[in-house]
Amino acid sequence: MRRRLTMPALPSRPMLVRALFVLLLSLLLAARPAAAQQVLRDAETEALFRDLARPLAISAGLQPGNVKVVLLQDPEINAFVAGGQTVYIQSGLITHADNANQVQGVIAHELGHVIGGHIINFSQGAKVATGVSLLSLLLGAAAIAAGAGEAGMGILSAGQQAAMGKFLAFSRTQEASADAASVRLLDGAHLSGKGSLDFFGKLRREEYRLSPSYADVDPYALTHPTSADRQAALEADFRKSRWWNAQTDPALEARFERVKAKLMGFVDDPKVTFATYPESNQSIPAHYARAYAWHKSGYPKKAVAEADALLAASPHDPYFLELKGQILLESGNPAAAVPILREATERTRNEPLIAALFGHALIATEDRKNLPEAREILRTAVARDDQNPFAWYQLGLIYTQEGDLARAALASAERNSLEGRDNLALSNAEMAMQGIPAGTPDWIRAQDIAMVSRTALEQAKRKRR
């Protein structure tokens, strides 16, 4: 007995284009959208990323200050761009990378997408695929209308496969183009391509692990060329560079090892961290990793002991001070954390993320004498980095305690806007405008948030119709 298929109503052209676009975009990025993943922010890590990316941005003809590298908490080995000049790197890539040069190779590839305008040109590949799919839809519908149901379904299926094949070929071409651009960018930055080739080797081994035989992999069903093909295509070009044997700055490599260790301590299961960095390992990265692992496990004394070991090696390192202050603060001892975080803030010249933590410690002491200092620290922090919801929340607490409810509402509007809660952002912004003198900078900012949030809510409402 055969089950009879009931054909759904054929979609309209706009619906089909939109559905296909979403599907193709997911294949192009090969990653969940950044908004759906947790962004990990850390002052030391972001400083390292800026220094890794700077020579590559200059080589690409971009302004270094406009290029951002954002870390996402995701165990997969992946990086991508999704518009603008922001490179998203997933935590799994950092924890699997062996050195800073490998990460620079990845950044060079992603900047190749940026300067190639690949996200902008995405519509070209989607247009070709959509055209094929629409043609098959029309032919299939005609066949079904003529009574040839199975033939019509076959046409639809074949058309879908052809459309996807067209798009995947377009995507592979873009990836090959970005690879070629990475050769130029690394050469222009006087950096070796060894890291890139080594990382392709790492990816190649991962591909073998997932599929022991390349016979099992259809290269035409991939968004990227295989790692083996990419390695072979690029090796000769990398070796031609006069910078093939260039060595990465040892200080930069040491910073990478620190960041990698603290990231592993933060994202990995503590058992994994302790196995990777056993007590017998007394290196700086090992102390870093164990400090985070002990803190995450609920052993503040052990975590502080690891932080103290770091400070014994470098008593005024601001990131070691930040770590100890964070452990003390989050373990319920804000008074002890205050002087440590104050020094960390001063030594980084009010680095916004560290300053926000310091402001939080001042508030957590529950001593009203600390509120004026906390307010100034946090106002400076959000002026330098207004993309930190935590800092806006802390500033809102201060305004509330001081009775400035209008600016407390503005701080809440800023936080809710960053976190995508447009309805709350709108209501808080309107509340702020009622209590802040019209025409002042704070009032204008509240008005901007209200306008943006209202527009976003209206667009979401139209999409639901």
Image (cartoon, rainbow, N blue to C red):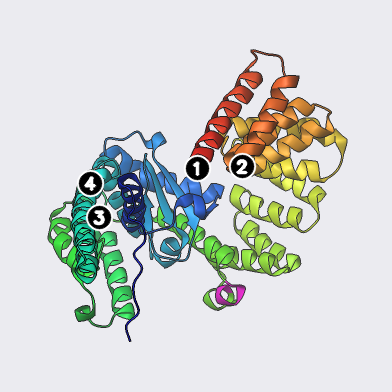
Considering the numbered disc 3 on the image, is that residue within a helix, a strand or a loop? loop
Residue 140: quadrant of the picture: bottom left
- Label 2 to label 1: alpha-carbon separation: 20 Å
User: Looking at the picture, how far across and down is residue 63, in whole percent?
Assistant: 35, 33
Relative horizontal placement of residue 198, taking residue 349 as reference (left or right): left
> Callout 4: helix, strand or loop?
helix
Mark with earlier residue (3, 4) = 4
Q: State how far apart marks 4 and 1 are (Cα).
A: 26 Å
- Residue 113 makes an appearance in the image: yes
Q: Which callout, 2 or 1, points at the residue further toward the start of the chain? A: 2
Residue that mark 2 sits on: 421
Q: Which residue is mark 1?
A: 465
Q: Earlier in the sequence, mark 2 or mark 3?
A: 3
Q: Tell me the distance, in whole angstroms, between the alpha carbons under discs 1 and 3.
A: 54 Å
Residue where numbered disc 4 is placed: 127
Image point 73% across, 69% down: which residue?
299
Residues at marks 2 and 3 touching, judged by CB atoms closer than 8 Å? no
Image coordinates of residue 189 in percent, x first then y, are 26, 44
Depth check: give the residue in front, 442 or 61. 442
Q: Earlier in the sequence, mark 4 or mark 1?
A: 4
- Residue 264 image point, x, y percent: 53, 66
The span shown in magenta is 269-273
Q: Amino acid at mark 1?
A: Arg
Nearer the observer, 235 or 447? 447
Vertical position of residue 354 compared to residue 312: above or below: above
